[in-house]
Image (cartoon, helix red, strand yellow):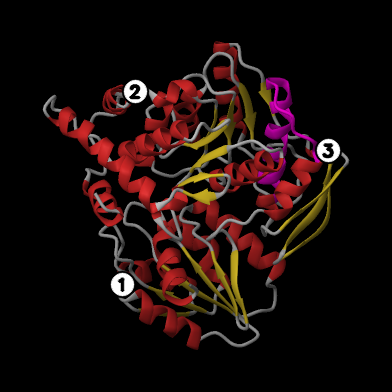
Amino acid sequence: MTYNEAIDYIMSRRKFQKSSSHERIGRLLELLGSPEKGLKFIHIVGTNGKGSVSTAMSYILKKASYKVGLFTSPYIVEFGERIQINNAYISHSDIAELTCLIKEKTDLMEKEDLYPTVFEVTTALALLYFAKEACDIVLLEAGIGGERDSTNVIPAPLECIFTSISLDHTEMLGDTVEKIAKEKSGIIKKGSAVISYPNSSESFGYLPQKAEAVNIIRARCRETGCSFYMPETDKLTVLKSDIYGSEFIYDSMRIKTSLCGAHQIANMITAITAARLLRDKGFDISDEDIISGVACFKIPGRMEIISSAPLVILDGGHNEGCMKALSSMIKAYLHGKKITLLMSFMKDKDYESSLKHIAPLCENIVFTQTDSLRGERPEVLKESAVSFGGNILCEGDSYAAYKKALSLTDKDGALIVAGSFYLVSEIRKNFFQ
């Protein structure tokens, strides 16, 4: 099996199955020799911020000289971005070799009337790779949800991290923050330390974790006897924050990050809290490892400045929480600039709620559609945005849409590409690689 054949095979699997039990992923891992049983995990769930927190922690642990597996989604650069060890993508040859082995097992499963999904196969691929390479610790990001998510097949993790929780995937997880938090809190198992994104009233411009989510998580901790932790924002002093990143002091550590926005400061202190708590689990992590790890890490497609003349920012934000963060960033750092927005959304997203936060701030909006069959038509998106005013255009081809949006952007203005990781990935590959 070649690399391209492996990717084609993975993507040919069903995206979703009606049954949401762990029967398929459990059986697949059993046939593969249960690679998850020999690994130590940190399990990360949430609506927004999972990638930022897990990637920051991977850099911190790497600085502390550990061999660190990272499983995340979606990918911006290439498929291997989802499965990393010490911040290096899994090789094409490893993908081909391990997928060939997985296919042998899924062929057997299909005779048992079990059909693993794309995400289940990808999860198995990651766990098999991390076990093969004898990782010291694995940062495992959940896909959708928590309790019923394929990643929840693992044994009790060292830590469970909850990033910001808000409404998304409501058709699967529930239509309230409480319902979504309950589903996500299902990852908590006896023996794990539990860390949540901050909800303190000591505000520095971020949207705190909602009280109803915190209450659900705390209740699950009580049921399982797990300790609950949250960053102490009274120990935080923001020194500098602009479009190019932030500098702050947290509990006597002077931290720099290239990530933009108050919400990213909140993500970083969440990661820092989790990293320090690992010391109680026997990990030798110094404050200098934390400072250096946060300072050096980057993550594609998250408020990523890809050009400065004109200013072009790629942000894969695709739900209302992301749009609130993006609008806050525009108000704080791009005040006075004329904003052009290039945007697409998936059909299953609540784009009307998202647009009300971002559309009024833009002089021009160009709606387009990605290659994904789930992409909403530009004309439908335009209908949802016309009430906010501005110059609104539709262009079905994302390549042509970017060219159009760039032509509308003043040299002193800013072009922001947002609304879909699929779109961000397409623009990045076509214009900036």
- Residue 76: x and y in percent read 45, 59
Q: Which residue is mark 2?
A: 33
* Position above or below: 340 against 316: below
- Residue 253: x and y in percent read 85, 43
Q: Earlier in the sequence, mark 2 or mark 3?
A: 2
- Which is in the foreground here, disc 2 or disc 3? 2
Residue drawn at x 33%, y 66% as measured from the top left: 370
Residue drawn at x 72%, y 21% as measured from the top left: 280
**Residue type (three-letter) at the residue carrying disc 1:** Glu
Q: Around disc 1, counting alpha carbons within 10 Å, would you say few (fewer than 14), some (14 to 19), or many (20 or more)? A: some
Distance, label 1 to label 3, CA atoms, is 47 Å
Q: For residue 87, say whether it is visible.
A: yes
**Residue type (three-letter) at the residue carrying disc 3:** Asp
The quadrant in which residue 210 appears is top right
State the predominant SS element of the stretch in magenta: helix
Based on the picture, tell me whether residue 76 belongs to the magenta stretch: no
Distance, label 2 to label 3, CA atoms, is 47 Å
- Residue 32: x and y in percent read 31, 27
Q: Which residues are magenta?
A: 265-287
Q: Which residue is mark 1?
A: 379
